[in-house]
């Protein structure tokens, strides 16, 4: 029991604007129900007026038609009231959207202020200067490397690049047009050995 009574209630998320919108919608719905009820009643009284005319009761039929005419005027007024309620609901809902947008802008501005406090203009300028110095230093290195090569070296590099691209990395030497000189054979290959000659004579 102590926990129940000691527990703090959570704050309601329903605002006064939400309650106002809800009340306006409830009034609108009641007026629509009233419209529906009057329309059904008019249809019944119109049928009754036709029956009274058939029965020769013209005065009573005329009275019902006058009542119907008055109810038509009430329906017109009711329709205007419903339109006003709906317009008011739309205005309140749009105002709530505007409030949320303004709150979002406010939070955004606060975040920007905090970011500006973390990084000042001087800090940004220092970072930009260091970045520019780094770019200039790299540029100087590139210029030094480029200046160490002669025009001949540059052309050789381009030729090598083209050869690699075309798959012709190594150039083969040209084949000579003159016939190659004959190589003298050794003595053992020119004269057959004595044993070999003897074997040939015995075979004959």
Image (cartoon, grey):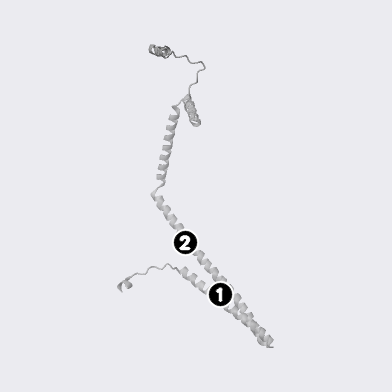
Residue shown at the point (49%, 62%) measured from the top left = 97
| Mark 2, residue position | 100
Q: Residues within 10 Å of mark 1 (few under 14, many from 20)?
A: some
Pair 2/1: label in front? 1
Q: Residues within 10 Å of mark 2 (few under 14, many from 20)?
A: few
Name the side, left or right, on which 190 lies relative to 88: left
For mark 2, give the secondary structure.
helix
As drawn, the label of residue 164 is none
As drawn, the label of residue 32 is 1
The one of 77 and 174 positioned closer to us in this rendering:
174
Looking at the image, how many numbered discs can be counted on the residues? 2
Where 17 falls versus 121 (above or below)?
Answer: below
Name the side, left or right, on which 94 lies relative to 195: right
Give the spatial CA distance, label 2 vs label 1: 32 Å
* Residue 102, percent from left and from top: 47, 59
Name the side, left or right, on which 143 lies relative to 57: left
């Amino acid at each position: 029991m102590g926990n129940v009574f000691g527990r703090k209630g959570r704050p309601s998320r329903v605002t006064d604007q939400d309650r106002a919108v809800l009340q306006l919608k409830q009034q609108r719905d009641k007026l629509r129900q009233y419209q529906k009820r009057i329309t059904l009643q008019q249809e019944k009284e119109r049928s009754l007026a036709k029956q009274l005319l058939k029965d020769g009761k013209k005065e009573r039929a005329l009275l019902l038609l006058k009542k119907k005419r008055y109810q038509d005027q009430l329906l017109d007024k009711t329709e205007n009231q419903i339109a006003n309620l709906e317009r008011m609901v739309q205005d309140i809902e749009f105002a709530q959207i505007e409030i949320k947008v303004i709150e979002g802008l406010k939070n955004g501005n606060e975040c920007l202020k905090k970011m500006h406090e973390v990084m000042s203009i001087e800090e940004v300028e220092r970072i930009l200067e260091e970045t520019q110095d780094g770019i200039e230093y790299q540029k100087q290195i590139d210029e030094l490397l480029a200046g160490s090569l002669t025009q001949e070296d540059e052309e050789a590099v381009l030729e090598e690049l083209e050869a690699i691209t075309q798959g012709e990395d190594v150039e083969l030497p040209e084949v000579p047009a003159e016939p190659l000189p004959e190589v003298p054979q050794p003595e053992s290959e020119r004269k057959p050995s004595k044993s070999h000659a003897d074997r040939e004579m015995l075979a004959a």
